[in-house]
Amino acid sequence: MILIIKAVEKRQAGRMFYPLSILFLCAAAAVPAAAVISSGSDYQIESSVQDNGGGLVLSGGGYDSKGSVGQILAAEGAGASVSGAYVNRAGFYNPPHLTFQKGLPAVITFNSGSASLTLPPGAVDKDTFDITLNKDPVSNPTFVDPSVINSANNKMERNEGAWARLFPENITEMFLFDDQDVWARPFAKSGTISMRYKDDNDDGVLDASNPPVRVDSIKTWALDESLAMWAKLPASSFDRVSRTITVPFMGPGVYAMLGTVDESVKDTYAFPVPFRPNGQLAGSGAGESGTEAAGITFTNVPQTGDIEIYTLDGRLVRKLAIPAGLTIPKLKWDVRTVGGGRAASGVYLWRVVSGSNSKTGKLMVIW
C-alpha cells in the first residue's frame, strides 16, 4: 500500500513553506505501525497516521490524509520509523500538533520517555481534534502564562521547602483543540498521564536535587490556573523499573512532578537489637550483635524530626536531631547518654517524630 500525505503551502512567522509531498510505503497493512514524529531545523511533523482501514479524512494545518487514522504516536523521533513501515519527513509546528479521532483511543509518547498520554475512545466530544504536549511551558509557553506557573512554584516552595523545587524536565503542558476552540472542559472519560523521574544511579534520590528529594516523596500535581497553585493528584502509581509515575486526569492543563519533605516513619527501625558489642556474636556484619564504634543504627529515618531514647520509666536518655540534607536515610546512636557516658545495660524505648507522624520501638543494650 502507498500512502501519500501532501503538505500545502503555508506561511508562518514571515516565512513561506512550499508544497511538499511525503511518501509512506507500507509493506503489510495487517501489521500495526507506530509512526515516529520527526524534528529538525524549522520543521516538526504536525500529524502522522496509522492505517486502520478507517477510510476517513484527517485534516490539520498543512496535512490531509485519507484512508488512515492517527492514534498511536511517538514524538521526538529522528525521522525513521518504529516498525519500518513509515518514514516521516516534515511538518510545521513545535511542539507538534497530533490529530486524533473521537471514537478511537489517543496515545502519545515522547521517545525520551519523559511523558506519555492516553485518552480512551469518546473522551472528547469532537469528531477530530489535535493534542499537543509541551515539555517547556515556562520558557516556551503555548497556552498557559508562565507567570502563573512561577507563582505556583514559589507558593509550593514556601509551603513545602526546597524539596518541592520544580525541575524543568518534570513538567508537561498538555492541551487539546481544533479549528474552532481550545478544549477547556473536563473529559467525558478520564485519561492517564505518565511522567519519568531521573534516578540514574538508583539510590532512591532524584538526580541533582539539593536538598535531596527522595523518590518516594514525589507526587504528580496539576496546575490550578485560577489560584496559581499546584494541586496534588490522587492515586499515583510508581513503576520503578521505568522510573515513571502514572496518574488519572480529567482535563487538559499543566502537570508536574514535585517532591516534598519525607516525613514517613512507618519503615524506621533500629539495629542491631540486642546491641551486645562484647558478646560471642560481636561484629558489624549481618546477624552480628554490633560493635561499640558502630553503635546502634536507625534506618529508613524521615528527612526531618528527632529520635528520642527513653528508659522504661520515661527518663530521656538521648535526643538525636535528624540533620538537614540527609541523603542516606540512616542515623547513628553512639549508645551514650546526653552527658556523654555509656548508656547502662537494659531495655530502652525509642521514638521517632517527624511532623505529625511518630513511631515507637524497643531496643536492648548488653555490655
Image: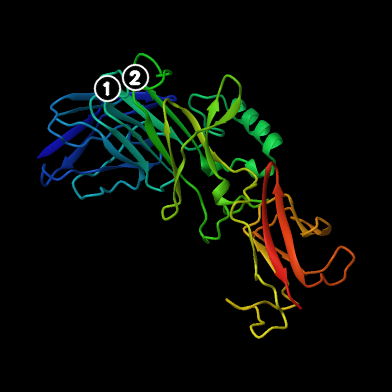
Instruction: Give the color scheme: rainbow, by chain, secondary structure or one colour.
Output: rainbow
Q: Label 1 crowding class (10 Å Cα cut-off): few <14, some 14-19, many 20+?
A: some
Q: Label 2 crowding class (10 Å Cα cut-off): few <14, some 14-19, many 20+?
A: some
* In the foreground, 94 or 320: 320
* Secondary structure state at the residue bearing disc 1: strand
Which residue bears the numbered disc 1?
A: 128
- Per the rendering, the mark at residue 266 is none
Q: Is residue 1 visible?
A: yes
Q: Earlier in the sequence, mark 2 or mark 1?
A: 1
| Residue 273 higher or lower than 100, as above or below | below
The image quarter containing residue 11 is: top left
* Secondary structure state at the residue bearing disc 2: loop
> Residue sitting at 70 percent across and 43 percent down?
355
Q: Residue 145's x, y, as percent? A: 56, 24
Amino acid at the residue labelled 2: Asp
Q: Is residue 289 left or right of residue 76?
A: right
* In the foreground, 215 or 341: 341
Q: Is residue 8 left or right of residue 343?
A: left
- Per the rendering, the mark at residue 178 is 2
Q: Is residue 152 left or right of residue 53?
A: right
